[in-house]
Every structure is written in structure tokens, then in C-alpha cells.
């Protein structure tokens, strides 16, 4: 967990450098996050590194990941081969 937080801060620092190099201001952009706790925490850490208020972003439920259970990591072709009867239903 701590490593991920450190990485988020590092990403914010890298973004800050990129914004400065390209003459852009971090505050000029719209920031959007998944509603998942780890995603919002990451967003707030990145925003802090950019010098932005932690809460100044949007949450969009369409960005929330979904789990595929036993099909996780399989291609559609793999799923059809393995569980074509389930897909047909």
C-alpha cells in the first residue's frame, strides 16, 4: 500500500514537470476518477503533488472496474471454447 502511495506521488511530480515543460497549468484540466477507494486516494495524492486541492475532481462510476471471476484474463475465444454453453444462454 505504501509503495503505491509513493508511486502516485512520484507520478504527480512527473506530471508537474511535464506540465511546466509544456507551458501548461495543472489547474486547467478536468480530473476524473473511478469511485473505487484506491483510485480516489491515488487521484488525491497526484493532485497534492500537482499543488491542487485534493477534492477538486469528478468521480465517474463508468470508470469502476468489473471482475470477470473465472473468466478473468481469458480472451473471448477462450471463454467460448471453455464455456460456450453459458455464453449462449
Image (spheres, rainbow, N blue to C red):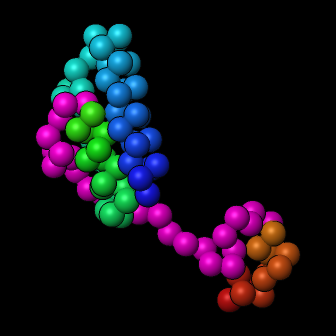
Q: Position of residue 30 (x, y in %)?
A: 24, 37
Residue 8 is inside the magenta segment: no
The relative height of residue 64 versus residue 30 in the rendered view (above or below) is below
Q: Is residue 61 visible?
A: no
Q: Nearer the viewer, residue 65 or 81?
A: 65
Residue 19 is drawn in which quadrant? Answer: top left
Q: Residue at x 20, y 26 (%)?
A: 28
The relative height of residue 24 versus residue 84 in the rendered view (above or below) is above
Q: Is residue 13 visible?
A: yes
Specify the principal SS of the magenta part.
Answer: loop
Q: Residue at x 66, y 70 (%)?
A: 72
Q: How many marks?
A: 0
Spot the residue most to the right.
81
Q: Quadrant of the N terminus?
A: bottom left
Q: Quadrant of the C terminus?
A: bottom right
Residue 48 is drawn in which quadrant? Answer: top left
Q: Residue at x 37, y 59 (%)?
A: 38
Q: Residue at x 72, y 87 (%)?
A: 86
The relative height of residue 5 versus residue 14 in the rendered view (above or below) is below
Q: Is residue 84 left or right of residue 62?
A: right
Spot the residue most to the front.
2
- The residues colored magenta run 50-77
Residue 61 is drawn in which quadrant? Answer: bottom left
Residue 73 is inside the magenta segment: yes
Amino acid at each position: 500500500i505504501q509503495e503505491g502511495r509513493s508511486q502516485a506521488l512520484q507520478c504527480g511530480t512527473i506530471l508537474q514537470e511535464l506540465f511546466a515543460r509544456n507551458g501548461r497549468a495543472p489547474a486547467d484540466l478536468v480530473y476524473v476518477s473511478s469511485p473505487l477507494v484506491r483510485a480516489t486516494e491515488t487521484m488525491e495524492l497526484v493532485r497534492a503533488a500537482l499543488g491542487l486541492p485534493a477534492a477538486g475532481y469528478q468521480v465517474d462510476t463508468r470508470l469502476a472496474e468489473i471482475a470477470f471471476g473465472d473468466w478473468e484474463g481469458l480472451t473471448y475465444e477462450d471463454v467460448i471454447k471453455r464455456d460456450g454453453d453459458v455464453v449462449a444462454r
